[in-house]
Image (cartoon, rainbow, N blue to C red):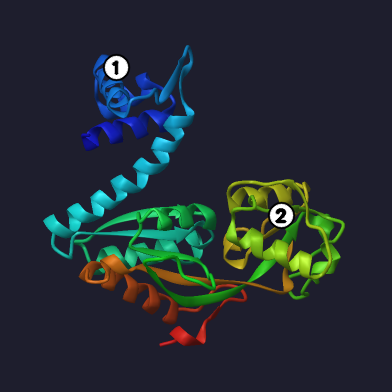
Amino acid sequence: MELTYLQYFLRVAELGSINRAALDLNLSQPALSRNIAALEHEVGTALFLRRRDGVKLTEAGRLFADRARPLLGQFALIKEEVGQTAAGQVTLGLPQAWQNVFTIAFLGQFVQRHPAVALKIYDGVSNILRDYLLSGLVDICIMPFEPLSPLGYTQTPLVREPMIALGDAKAGFRPAEEVPLSALENSWIIMPGRTNVLRQQVEQAFMRRGMRMRMQVEPSTQDLCIECARNGLGIGIVPASCLQGYANTDNLSWAPLKGICATWSLYENEARAHSEAVRAARQLIIDALAGKPLWFGAERVPAVSV
């Protein structure tokens, strides 16, 4: 089976259209159709349902896509290890919440110090980053702390920050006054879905207090959580790092949740520990967090203070 078949297949699956995928891949539509047909023949089953408005994965196609993505990721890592020097490429998984408080400044420093290293960035909420990590697609990832590190990764706690309750002006939150979780018992809560690690932690906090977490809107991004809360759809719960750029926004009130924090850890792919580029990225992450004031309520975890 040719790897290009897998790449073409995944692009068609992502775009839901052979025509759009062909345009994106700079192929003719008949050529791409032949490649997909050849792949289906080799696999022995149909991977797509053809419809007038595009294509849709069959059940077998969904299973094949789940297996193909990590295979391509692993092949990319193997190719880099064999064919490139350690100064080749680093793949980072960075939390969406940290974009304005850390990511942009970090990337600027890294590019300046290591111009020969190519950076590939996955930026997303915790459950998306965890999927990338479990697929072996990232060398280094910053995600919420887990009691047991995923197989093949070492974990170093980095930063602890408060979780924030936010709503419109009528919610009346004040940054200087912590909000007990009990105050939200009858409120509609806005957070990402249950696969999100921080959502799971907050839901467990509700359960420990014998409370039910009432959900109505489950955005897939932190920014949309904030916008929904600002427009009065409920009480958003996000890490404090998300507030950069929103703290002084009209019609938004916010306050830290009492006793509920997010702890972020650095996860390192053990298979890439030999890479000088990966080691350089790790050190710069720790140096960047140690050498600057952190955002509202955030503190470095003592184990990695330098």
Which three-letter amino acid code belongs to the residue tagged 2? Asp
Which numbered disc, 1 or 2, marks the residue closer to the eye?
A: 1
Locate residue 120, reporting x and y percent. Answer: 32, 54
Measured as percent of width and height from the top left, residue 182 is found at 84, 68
Q: Is residue 22 visible?
A: yes
Choose the circle earlier in sequence order: 1 or 2: 1
Whether residue 298 is situated above or below residue 243 in the rendered picture: below
Residue 47, horizontal then vertical, whole percent: 40, 26
How many numbered marks are there?
Answer: 2
SS at mark 1 in the image = helix
Check the image and report above or below for 10 versus 177: above
- The residue located at (67%, 48%) in the rendering is 227
Q: Quadrant of the C terminus?
A: bottom left
Q: Is residue 32 left or right of residue 128?
A: left
Which part of the image, by quadrant, shows the N terminus? top left
Position above or below: 4 against 267: above
Q: Is residue 247 visible?
A: no
Q: Nearer the viewer, residue 197 or 93?
A: 197
Per the image, the residue denoted by label 1 is: 29
Query: Where 194 falls versus 293 (above or below)?
Result: above
Name the amino acid type tagged 1. Answer: Gln
User: Residue visible at 29% across and 45% down?
Assistant: 72
- Label 1 crowd bin: few (<14), some (14–19), many (20+), radius 10 Å: some
Are there few (<14), some (14-19), or many (20+) residues within 10 Å of tag 2?
few
* Depth check, front residue: 181 or 193: 193
Q: Is residue 242 left or right of residue 205?
A: left
Residue depicted at x 44% and y 84%: 304
Tell me the residue that label 2 is attached to: 250
Q: Nearer the viewer, residue 96 or 7?
A: 7
Farthest right residue in view: 186
Spatial separation of the CA atoms under disc 1 and disc 2: 50 Å
